[in-house]
């Protein structure tokens, strides 16, 4: 888990560190006709039941680009940082969640036994759930706290014979990924461990990284800790991607309770160049161990000194001769200027830089771009980002990517088919509705693969949802431009197949 936490912190550092264009351009008539033909074929290929007029297809593409533009954050402006450290940007974006956690800890410190509450914190892949979870328990005494990562706990159970790998996304013998699931004996073991727990605070991370068959069971078991009939203070906080809470939350709507609350973790907002500088500072301190070397210890490199150091061109002479860090190509004037320019001028970059995991990926792509000397290319950036994102999801959910290439082409084809299938039903917020019975298919080894759309999307790491509202089944690609990229890849694939 340590490695995962370190990966998540990329771009933002330690918790306590020092504390697209809208519209279509004019093109030749033949290119327009070809593009419309390909998209028309694409929609029929994925099983859209009714014919669609070409002008409606063009309108859908324009609508998707307009939605992307409307959902972009405001353009970066010159200015001072709005917060002192990265975690404060999270609390700024999530004031109700911060208030809820502070209230719980205050009641605990005041020995208030009249508190039983379970908080569910949902957020899209990479937004910073693992990073922010420390706010749920920071300052609590060790004897009052039980915190665990759901996947790590199941891995320990597996060593004892209480959990086993079970296929998640699959069609017959074609298995795209496997996830750990409890055996009957494992469920008894988990129940016993939870119900015999003496900790007053229980914090659970990575619920989405276990098999979906266990989501409701785990949540219902944890809920018993905060049932009003149990005496004494009890606080449970569970972190996961939105889909892992969906079925449990729907069950609560049938029998409402007032001791379970759901929060959607909003990503922080970077509005000024100073905000990006805080991100740089945290990234450098975490990623490269940036600090001051004293006689017998290392000291935190303050943000004020960091700003001066950046203005000096990252020199290690004179007043900065005591600075130490791992060798890298990120801390250069050229890299930071290019990063700021991309964030300010490129909508695809601005759309992702506030996501915790994506922030580090953008920085890596910036360094690679400097090495090649090429200008920014939106399609190339999107492809590089998607490849990195798929690798990340291989590590968390065992889905295919370049580091687990078996069935990767079929997996991407399925994702592309879904993007095309729902391209006409995108709403103003970028969402579309997926019914529980809907499926998607693609050709594979002379036959077809057919899987549920929800199962494909839910653990892909490429979509998000609002599990605690009333928009059941409504999802959105995250970032939204992934929808457009996948449609484009689908069209290219179909045009290639047609050419053959």
Image (cartoon, rainbow, N blue to C red):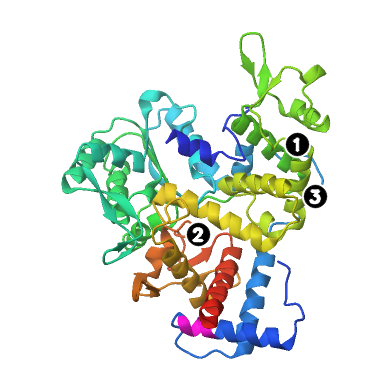
Dot 1 or dot 3: first in sequence order is 3
Toward which corner of the image does residue 322 lie, by quadrant? top right
Secondary-structure class at tag 1: loop
Say which mark, if any, is on residue 332: 1
Side of 328 where 206 appears, left or right: left
The disc, 2 or 1, on the residue closer to the chain's N-terminal end is 1
Q: Rounded to the nearest whole Å, what is the CA distance between mark 1 and mark 3?
A: 21 Å
Q: Is residue 105 above or below residue 360?
A: above
Q: Is residue 150 above or below residue 341?
A: above
Q: Is residue 120 visible?
A: no
The percent coordinates of residue 454 (x first, y second) are 40, 66
Disc 2 to disc 1, how far (Cα)? Answer: 32 Å
State the mark number for residue 77.
3
- Residue bearing the label numbered 2: 462
Where does the image place residue 178, in percent across and percent down from the top left? Answer: 32, 53
The quadrant the N terminus occupies is: top left
Tag 3 and tag 2, C-beta contact below 8 Å: no
């Amino acid at each position: 888990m340590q490695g995962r936490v370190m990966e998540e912190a990329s771009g933002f550092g330690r918790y306590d560190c020092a504390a697209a264009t809208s519209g279509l351009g004019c093109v030749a008539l033949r290119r327009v006709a070809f593009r419309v033909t390909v998209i028309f074929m694409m929609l029929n290929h994925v099983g859209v039941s009714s014919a669609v007029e070409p002008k409606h297809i063009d309108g859908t593409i324009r609508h998707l680009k307009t939605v992307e533009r409307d959902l972009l954050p405001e353009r970066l402006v010159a200015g001072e940082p709005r917060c002192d450290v990265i975690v404060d940007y999270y609390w700024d974006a999530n004031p109700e969640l911060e208030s809820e956690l502070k209230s719980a800890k205050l009641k605990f410190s005041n020995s208030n036994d009249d508190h039983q509450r379970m908080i569910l914190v949902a957020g899209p892949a990479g937004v910073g759930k693992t990073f922010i979870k420390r706010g749920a328990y920071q300052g609590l005494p060790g004897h009052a706290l039980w915190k665990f990562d759901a996947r790590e706990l199941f891995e320990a159970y597996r060593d004892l014979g209480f959990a086993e790998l079970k296929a998640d996304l699959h069609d017959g013998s074609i298995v795209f990924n496997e996830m750990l699931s409890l055996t009957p004996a494992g469920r008894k073991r988990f129940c016993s461990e939870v119900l015999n727990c003496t900790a007053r605070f229980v914090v659970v991370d990575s619920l989405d990284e276990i098999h979906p068959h266990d989501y409701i069971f785990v949540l219902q078991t944890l809920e018993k800790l905060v049932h009003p009939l149990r005496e004494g203070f009890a606080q449970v906080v569970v972190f996961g991607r939105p889909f892992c809470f969906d079925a449990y939350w729907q069950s609560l709507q049938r029998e409402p309770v007032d001791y379970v609350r759901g929060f959607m973790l909003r990503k922080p907002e970077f509005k000024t160049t100073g905000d990006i500088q805080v991100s740089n500072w945290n990234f450098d301190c975490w990623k490269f161990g940036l600090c001051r070397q004293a006689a017998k210890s290392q000291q935190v490199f303050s943000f004020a000194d960091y700003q001066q150091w950046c203005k000096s061109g990252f020199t290690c002479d004179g007043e900065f001769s005591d600075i130490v860090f791992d060798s890298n190509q990120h801390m250069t004037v050229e890299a930071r200027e290019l990063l700021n320019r991309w964030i300010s001028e490129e909508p695809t970059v601005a759309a992702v830089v506030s996501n915790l995991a994506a922030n580090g990926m953008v920085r890596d792509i910036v360094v690679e771009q400097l090495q090649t000397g090429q200008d920014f290319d939106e399609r190339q950036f999107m492809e590089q980002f998607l490849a990195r994102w798929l690798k990340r999801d291989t590590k968390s959910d065992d889905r295919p990517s370049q580091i687990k290439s078996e069935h990767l082409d079929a997996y991407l084809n399925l994702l592309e088919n879904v993007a095309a299938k729902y391209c006409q039903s995108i709403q103003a917020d970028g969402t579309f509705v997926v019914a529980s019975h809907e499926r998607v298919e693609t050709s594979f080894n002379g036959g077809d693969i057919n899987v549920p759309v929800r199962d494909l999307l839910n653990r892909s790491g490429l979509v998000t949802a609002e599990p605690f509202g009333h928009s059941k089944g409504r999802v959105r690609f995250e970032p939204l431009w992934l929808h457009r990229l996948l449609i484009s890849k689908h069209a290219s694939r179909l045009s290639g197949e047609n050419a053959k």
